[in-house]
Image (spheres, rainbow, N blue to C red):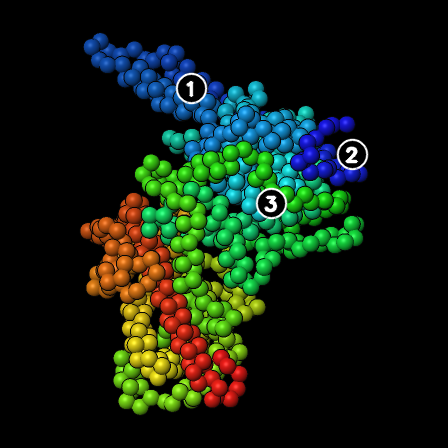
Amino acid sequence: MREFPDYYPPTPRRVPADLTEPSAPFRKQMNLFGVSVLLFFALYFGLIMLLAIGVVFCVTTPGAPSAPGQPNAWGILRWLVAGLLCVPIGILIKNLFHKEQLEKDYSIEIFPDDHPKLFRFLECVCAETGAPMPDRVMINHEINAAAGSEISVASLFSKPERTLFLGLGLLNVLNMTEFKAVLAHEFGHFSQQSMQSAPYARLGMLVINNILHGTHFGLDKVMDAIFFFMVKLHLALKREMEFHADLVAVSVAGSDAIPQLLFKCWWAEACMQQTMAELDMAREHDLYSRDVFVPQIRAGKHLRRRQKDPNFGEPPALPDERSRTMQLFRPEEDELAEMWSDHPSNYDRELNAKADYIRSDFDDSTPWTLFGDLDGLRREVSMRFYRQAFRVKASSVKWSSPEKVQAFLNEERAETSFDEERYGTLYNNRNLQALDPRALRTVSDKKPNVPEELLAGMRSLYSARVKRFGEVHQRHIEEHQMLTAIVNRWYRPKGGRFKMRNQRFQVREAREILRDLEKELEADTTWLRAFDTKVFVTYYELGQHLNPALAEELHDRYQFHFVIQGMWSILQGHKAPMSFMFDLLDEIGNQMDEDTFHLLIDIFRQAYEAFELVLEESALVHFPKLANMPAGESMRPFLLKGRLANKPSHFDEMLSVKWLVDFANQFQDVDKHLDRLHFKSLGNILSLQENIGARAEKKWGALVPGVAG
C-alpha cells in the first residue's frame, strides 16, 4: 500500500478495475487514425520519391545534339526543370524537421527544491494513475491546465519531453480534490502517448500538422485536401481521449470532481475577464498590482453581488444520500457541428464521468498551500500577466500593492454601480432620452411644485410596472441589434434561419420584422422621454426646495451627461458593424467577393468620420468632478493618447491589414473610455438623485402618506 502525505486527498474506494481501460470507441478511433497516419506518410514520402525520380530523369536523359556553336536548348530545359522540381522536394524534406515549439514565453518553470509539497503531490497523482512524471512544470496566470510536448518527426521514434502547464487562475476557485482531478486528467493524456494499442498516433497528427502548415509553392491546396480528410478522424479521436482522461481523473477523485471542475472553470474565467478589464482601467492611472489573483477574488464577490446570489458560480451541494448526485449541465444547442469540435460538450463529459457513479469526497482546503514562497511566485506570474495582456515590461512601471489597486477599483465600482433592486434594467445600455435640462430648469424655477407632491411622485417613479418595461425595452434593443446585423449582412445565421421570441424565421423575413420592431422602439422612446423628464423635474425641484446648490449640481451633471452620451451614441452606431465585419473577415479569410469588399470599405469610412467628430468634440469638453478623473481638464487626452491613425488617401482601394488593426485598436480604446465615462456620469446622477430623495424623505416624509421611497 502506497504512503501518501496527509495533505493528499483520499482516493475513492471500490473503483472498478477496468474503469480506465480504453473503451471500444477509443480503440477504434485510435486504430483508424493510426492507419491514416501511415497512409499519409506513405503518400508524403511517395511524393518526394516521385519528384526525385523526375529530377534524376531530367539529369540523366540524353538530349539531341545541337549544331556547333549553338546552345543546347534541350540540355538547358532539362536542368531548368530539374531545378524547379528540387524546390518542392526541399520544402517537403525541410518540413519533416519542422519543430512545434510550446508556448512558454509568458510561463515560468518551477522546480522541486522551491515547491517540494507540489512536486510530492504530482508524484502521488502519477503513482495512482500510472502516468510518467512530467519533465518540466510551467505556470502562468491562465484558467487552464495542459499536458504538452515539443513535437517533431523525431518524436515518432523517441519519447518527447513532457511538460505540464498549470494556470494559477484556477487555484482561487478549486479545492484540493478538484485540483487532484485536474492533474489526473492531464496525466491521463501523458499515459495515452505510450499506450501499446497505438503508440504515437496522437504525436503523428501533430507532426502532420507541422508539415502541412509549412508547405508552400503550389502544394498548399493538395496538402489542405489531405489535411481535410484526416482532421475529422483526428478530432473524433481527441474527443475519445478527453473521455478517457476524465475517467482517469474519476478513478482517483470520484465522479463529481470533473463536472464540478468544469463548472468552476467557467466561473474562474468570468472572474478573470472582469479582473482583466478592471486592471486595464487601473493601468491607465499608473496602478499595477503585484498580485493579480487578489483582484480575481474580489471580482468574484462583485459578480455575486451584482447577481444578488452569494453562491453564484458555486455548484450545488451533493445530496446526503451517497448513491445519488445531481446533473450540473444540460444538453446544449451547439451551432458548431460536433465533427469540428475537439472536446465533447460538458453535458457529455458529465454523463461519461458518472456512468459508473463513484461519490467524490471533497477536501475543501486550497491548493495554494502546495506552493512555496507564494508572495514571490504570485508577483512574478503577475508581472508576466501584464507583459502578455498589456505588453507592459516589469522594469518600466512602478508596482503597487494589491490593496491600493483594489481601493481604486472599489471607488470606481461605487461610482458606476446602480441599485438593480431599485432600477431593474431601466438604465442598462441606453441613453437618457432627449430633453433640455436648461429649459426644464427655467420652467421649474418659475413655478415649482410643492415638496409633498414631489415626494409622492418620487415614491412612485420606479414601480414594478416601470421595471417590467425596462426588461422589455432591453429585449427590444438586443433584437434590434441582431436584426440590423442580419439585414445589413454583417451577420449570417447558420442555415439561413434565426430565432426570436421563441420562434424561428427565415433570413428574408428579417427586414419586415425589423420595421415592426422599430415601431415598438419608437413607442419605447416616447415613453422614456416622458419618464426621464419626470425624473429630472422631480429631483431638480426637490433639490431647489432643499438647497439650490443641489439643484444646480444636478442640472450641470445632466448637461455634461448629454454631451457624453451624444459622443457615446455616435460610436455605438458603428461598434456593431465593425465587430461583425471583423468576425466575417476572420471567417472568410482572403476569399472576399466584391460586394463584401465594398461593404467593408463603406463601414470603415463611416466609422472613421464618426471617430474624427467625437475626438474633435472631446477637445472642447472638460471633466466635472468625477472619481479618478482630472476635474477641469480636457477629455481629449483621456479618450485617446496620441494621434489618430492617418486616414487612407483612397478609401476605395484595399485597406491594409495594419491600418485596419491600428484603427480598430484606437476605436476600441475610445469606445472603452466613453463607456466608462458614460456609466460614471450616469452613476453620479443617480447617486445625487438618491441623496436628494433621502434628504427630502427626512424633511417631509412624515407629511406624505404612504410608504417612504
**Residue 316 falls in image quadrant:** bottom right
Nearer mark to the viewer, of 1 and 3? 3
Q: Is residue 314 visible?
A: yes
| Residue 652, x across and y down, in percent | 24, 53
Secondary structure type for disc 1: helix
Q: Residue at x 31, y 15 (%)?
A: 75
Q: Point out the frontmost of discs 2 and 3.
A: 3
Q: Tag 2: residue type?
A: Ala
Residue type highlighted by circle 3: Leu
**Mark in the foreground, 1 or 2:** 2
- Residue at coordinates 66% horizontally, 36% vertically from top-left? 7
- Whole-percent x and y of residue 203? 56, 28
SS label for mark 2: loop
Q: Which residue is mark 3?
A: 174
Q: Amino acid at mark 1?
A: Gly
Badge number at residue 54: 1
Name the residue tied to disc 2: 17
Closer-to-camera residue (62/658): 658
Decide which of tag 1 and tag 2 comes sooner along the chain.
2
